[in-house]
Amino acid sequence: MPVINKIDLPAADPDRVKEQIESVIGLDAHDAVLVSAKAGLGIEDVLERVVRDIPPPQGDPEAPLKALLFDSWYDPYRGVVCMVRVVEGTLRHRDKVLFMASSRSYPVDELGIFTPKAGPVDQLSVGEVGFFYAGIKDLHLAQIGDTITHTDRPTAAAYPGFQEVKPMVFAGLYPVSADDYEDLRDAVDKLRLNDASFTFEPESSGALGFGFRCGFLGLLHMEIIQARLEREFNLDLITTAPGVRYLAHTTDGKVHEIDSPSKLPDAGRIDYLEEPYITSTIITRSDYVGAILALAEERRGTQKSLQYLTIDRVLIEYDFPLAEVIHDFYDRLKSVSRGYASFDYHLVGYRKSELVKLDILINGDPVDALSLIIHRDNSYQRGKVLVEKMKDLIPRQMFEVVLQAAIGSRIIARESIRPISKNVIAKCYGGDISRKRKLIEKQKEGKKRMKRVGRVDIPQEAFLAVLRVD
């Protein structure tokens, strides 16, 4: 049911919007309701159309209970709050209900609805939406999309529900100070209580110590989680470069899900790699088509269609590797289009790609937190720019620091950071030159010894450089 809002604005053009709805969405919009929520225009028309056009719920109130759990969150005083929509049957206070996905039973302690404030009710019947408390302490026992029924009179089959939410972007979260690891673990545990789409598992890094490999729905979700950890729990964090989940097909016929470069099997065991692809829709003004097409080709996009919706509005469809979109694609798109571009996408599956693991070596030792899985065609340029960027960000040490980018055993880029030098011959006035040479050689031996046992200080900016290189 199309509804066009904000018709009170001076720039409102309902006829043009109707054309866009029909051409982009494919929905008949000739009788779209014109509304201004601010001015109160068309509100009664919307309600009348809902009553007239949207069918009432179908179901038998006397049938076995079948309710869809579509939302849940954690209340520190009452436990898990379950939001349900009753499809069949009737849910009453003190009923004992069964969660079909987890096969666990709980008594309903309280039943209510939002109007919009929460208020108690005696029952929920067919088509009604409400909430209940059942003394559930673990949010993951109340899975979104689960079917709830009576324990003593269960329904014959579960409701189809939703597809399980799967993280699409993965990154490592490490405390700057190793002493904050326990605080970080408690913090991510608490965040997970109210966010079932956030996942984490312990991870260790030779450069960063102990932390967690976390899964997010997207970059915005990752930024929100990181901001909450830093603001609400007073944690100083290092976030590694985000990546996506790849599929590694090994020579023994097995398929491995890879959400971290450190989990990638040895190159000799890999038959081929697959990466997730998306189908995207970009709507923009005709003035910016050239710049957007150039950006899409740069990100390994494959054009599917290009059509003019109106004289000055264009719809472009592209297939992209998800890994090329999660970094800064949206910001670049807004920049080249001066804000006149919308971007929407959905996952379409996995495709075979020429992917390699790019390692960053510091004094010959790989820093696993800086490793990347990247397309072979972009690996040389990305490695070269990355080590050049890190050369400017890593502070000078008392010994020489060698930065290298490598694919397997092949070094593709190299930079050196000169050591901090002390003038050891400053106090030598004249005399035999051998005295000065002896002091210089002694200094060189000391720097070699420090290089063997010294630890390079890698600031957070160096890890962010993985994101920011163009």
Image (cartoon, rainbow, N blue to C red):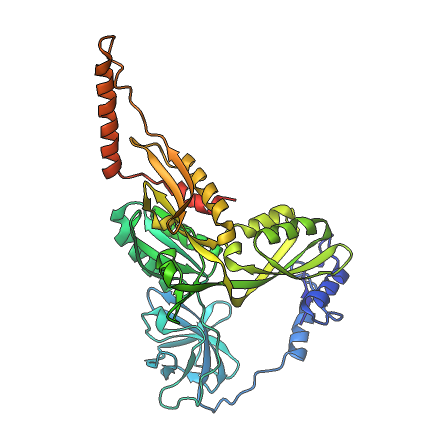
Left or right relative to 136: residue 245: right
Name the foreground residue: 42 vs 458.
458
Can you give x and y, in whole percent of width and height, for residue 60 in the image? 51, 90
Left or right relative to 260: residue 446: left
Can you give x and y, in whole percent of width and height, for residue 393 in the image? 41, 36
Can residue 239 be spotted in the picture?
no
* Rendered residue at 68%/75% (across/down): 49
Can you give x and y, in whole percent of width and height, for residue 2 in the image? 68, 69
* Rendered residue at 36%/52% (across/down): 173
Can you give x and y, in whole percent of width and height, for residue 423 in the image? 29, 19
Q: Quadrant of the N terminus?
A: bottom right
Can residue 286 be spotted in the picture?
yes
Left or right relative to 422: residue 12: right
Q: How many numbered badges does the structure rendering display?
A: 0
* Rendered residue at 71%/54% (across/down): 9
Name the foreground residue: 6 vs 92.
6
